[in-house]
Image: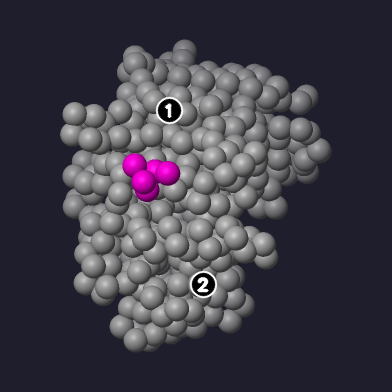
Amino acid sequence: MVLAGGEGKRLAPLTRDRAKPAVPFGGHYRLIDFVLSNLVNGGFRRIVVLTQYKSHSLDVHLSRTWTLAHLLGNYVVGVPAQMRRGPRWYSGSADAIFQNLNLFDDERPTHVMVFGADHIYRMDPRQMLEQHLDTGAGLTVAAIRVPRSEADQFGVIDVGAGTTIARFLEKPSDPPGLPDDPDRTLASMGNYLFDADLLRELVTRDAATESSRHDMGGDIVPSVVAAGDAHVYDFSLNEVPGESATDRAYWRDVGTLQSYFDAHMDLVAPEPEFNLYNYAWPIHTSGRLYPPMKVTEHHLEPSSLSNTMVCSGAIISGSSVNQALLSPGVRVHERCEIERAVLLDGVEVGAGAELRNVILDKGVRVPPGYQIGVDPALDRERFADRKGCIVTDEGLVVVGKGEQLPD
C-alpha cells in the first residue's frame, strides 16, 4: 500500500495543481516512480496507491505508466477515497488504510508493506522482509542514519536489544545517539512492514479512538512500540544491485522546495550522490516520444554545458548552462546564462536571459533579457507577494505552472 494522498503544502506552488507524488522530478520522472520502482524491482507487484488530493495527473500517470502483467496477477492500481466508512475523506494515513480494509478481504495477504510516495531513494524491500520474518516482529520500520542535529525534522527511533524499538520519539530536540555512531541517530523513513492481521487490528482500534490523529507515524507505530512488537530495519544495511559507494543508502525527503532543489543538484554533480544511470535497478517511468536533445551555436557563439542533465526534445542555442536540469521540451535561446536551475517541461528561456537558483514549473516563458537570481532584492520585490510564485528563505525563486513573469 503506497500512501499518496498528501497535499504537499510545503512544495507549493509545485503542488498547486497536482498531488505531491505527481510532482515531476529528474526530467522524465514523477516522485511516485521511485517507490513503485523499488517495489516492482524487488518482486512486489500487487500494489495499491491510496490517493486523495488533486489526484488527476497522478491517476493519469499511473494508468499510462504502471501497467503490469495482469496474466500473472500483478497490478498497480490507484484507489481514491471511496467513503466506504461514511461520507468523509481520509482523516489521516491510518484512516486511509482503515477505509480500504476491503482490499485485505480481496487479497488476503499475510504481510503488508505501507510505504510513502514522495521520497528519492533506491531500496531492495526483500531484505527488509527477510529481517521481519527472522525477528518475528509484528511491525518493522525502515530507518536511515541522520546527524543528531537534524533529528528534529523526523520521527526518531531509540533502539533496544537487537533490532527492537525501545522508544519512538516525534521530532526530539535531544535524540539518542547510536551505539556505534554517537553523533548520528535513526530516523524513520516512513516505510513500514506489518503482519496483515496486526495492521487490520491496529487501524480498526485507532478508528474508534476519538483522540487519535489517525496517523501511522504518530499513533499506530507508537502503539506497537509500547507493546514490544516493533523492530527497526537499518537502511544502511540495504544492498542494491549496481549501486556505487557514492550513492549507497541515499535517501531524500523532498518535502520542501529547498530539499527538492538540492536533490536535483545531487543528480547533476560530477559524481552524483544519486545515480539515475544504474541499469541494474532502474527507475521506471513512462516513455514519451520527443526528438533528441539538440545543442547548437548561434552566430558562431558556441553553447557551453557542464554538470547538466538535458532531456529529450530540449534545444539549447549558443548559451551557457551549468548545474542545471532541463526537462523534455525546454527551449533555451541565444546568449542565456543559466546556473543552478531546474526547468520543467516546456519552459522557454528568451534570448539574453540570466537564471540562477531557480525552479520554473511547466510552461513558464522567460522574456528576453530577464534576470532571476541576480538581484535578491529585486527578486523579492517581484515575486514575494505574487500568487503562484515564491522566494524561499534561502533565496530560491520558484515560479508555478504556466505563470506569467512580472515586469
Q: Is residue 183 above or below residue 38?
A: below
Image-quadrant location for residue 239: bottom left
Which residue in the structure is indicated by mark 2? 222
Where does the C terminus fall, quadrant-wise? top right
Q: Nearest the camera: 407 or 166?
A: 166
Q: Nearest the camera: 292 or 88?
A: 88
Q: Is residue 104 above or below residue 140?
A: above
59 relative to 69 in the view: left or right: right
| Labels 2 and 1: the sequence-earlier one | 1
Q: Nearest the camera: 21 or 107?
A: 107
Instruction: Give the amino acid type for the residue marked by disc 2 in the picture.
Output: Pro
The secondary structure making up most of the magenta span is helix
Assess whether residue 104 is covered by the magenta stretch. Answer: yes
Name the element at disc 1. helix
Q: Is residue 310 above or below residue 264?
A: above
Residue at the spot x=39%, y=64% of the render?
198
**Residue range highlighted in magenta:** 102-106
Badge 2 local density, few (<14 within 10 Å), some, or many (20+)? some
Q: Is residue 339 above or below residue 42?
A: above
Name the element at disc 2. helix
Q: Nearest the camera: 181 or 219?
A: 219
Q: Are marks 2 and 1 in contact (CB under 8 Å)?
A: no
269 relative to 149 in the view: left or right: left
Q: Residue 108, labelled with which disc?
A: none
Assess whether residue 302 is covered by the magenta stretch. Answer: no
Which residue in the structure is indicated by mark 1? 61
Residue at the spot x=57%, y=57% of the render?
207
Badge 1 local density, few (<14 within 10 Å), some, or many (20+)? some
Expressed as whole percent of the image width and height from the top left, the position of residue 352 reads: 60, 23
